[in-house]
Amino acid sequence: MDFGDILDQWDKQQKNAAGKQKESGKNQVSHKKANAPTPEEKAAVRSRAIDPGFDKRINPEEAWLRRYGTVDKDRIADEAEERARENSQHYLKNLPVEARLDLHGLTQEEARNRLSSFVGDCMQRGVRKVLLVHGKGLHTTGSDPVLGEVVRKFIETDKRCGTSGHPDKRMGGNGATWLVLKA
């Protein structure tokens, strides 16, 4: 078999394949694919569209903004400034006292129990700053007032307690301690 015979055989196979395609296409009404939508189906799809002139392409900038959003740097800066101001010692010292607890005449154990329940109650009510009056300890034998030391240790160990300090003389001076509760 030479090259000419191979070429003739190939031509015959191509003609046979073309004839089979014509026979299978005799039942088809149009030259479209059998599963192509009819004009009625196309009209129904068009009528369901929101806007016939709607462009399906999305602006790349809009797509990026939808995906990643924007950052309001002014709002972030304002919030950071507000947090810094709220945590400054001057601001905390000048916050109004919302609740008071007088510990005069109590034992150390009674004072600890009252402190714990008072702080828990204030946390539930949303109180921010409290005043704990413990006295200067005029009747104690040691150098430091006993209840003042109890209050200081309580504040250091209780996780609900934040910043603390002594108020000015008209609010009790060294005989009282103000306390800012953590939110």
Image (tube, grey):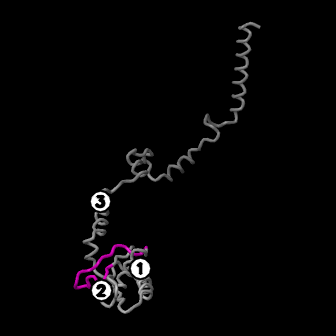
Disc assigned to residue 54? none
**Observer-nearest of 83 and 155:** 155
Q: Which quadrant of the structure image shows residue 138?
A: bottom left
Q: Earlier in the sequence, mark 1 or mark 3?
A: 3
Q: Earlier in the sequence, mark 2 or mark 1?
A: 1
Mark 2 Cα-neighbour bin, 10 Å: few <14, some 14–19, many ≥20 = some
| Image position, residue 79 (x, y; %) | 31, 63
Left or right: 94, with 55 as reference point: left
Q: Residue at x 34, y 84 (%)?
A: 142
Farthest bottom residue in view: 105
Disc 2 is placed on an element classified as loop
Residue 26 vertical position relative to residue 79 in the rendered view, above or below:
above
| Image position, residue 182 (x, y; %) | 39, 73
User: On the image, numbered disc 2 is attached to which residue?
Assistant: 136
User: On the image, numbered disc 3 is attached to which residue?
Assistant: 77
Q: Which residues are magenta?
A: 159-178
Disc 1 is placed on an element classified as helix
Q: CA distance from mark 1 to mark 3?
A: 29 Å
Q: CA distance from mark 2 to mark 1?
A: 27 Å
Farthest right residue in view: 1
Q: Which quadrant of the structure image shows residue 83?
A: bottom left
Q: Residue at x 67, y 36 (%)?
A: 28
User: On the image, numbered disc 1 is attached to which residue?
Assistant: 123
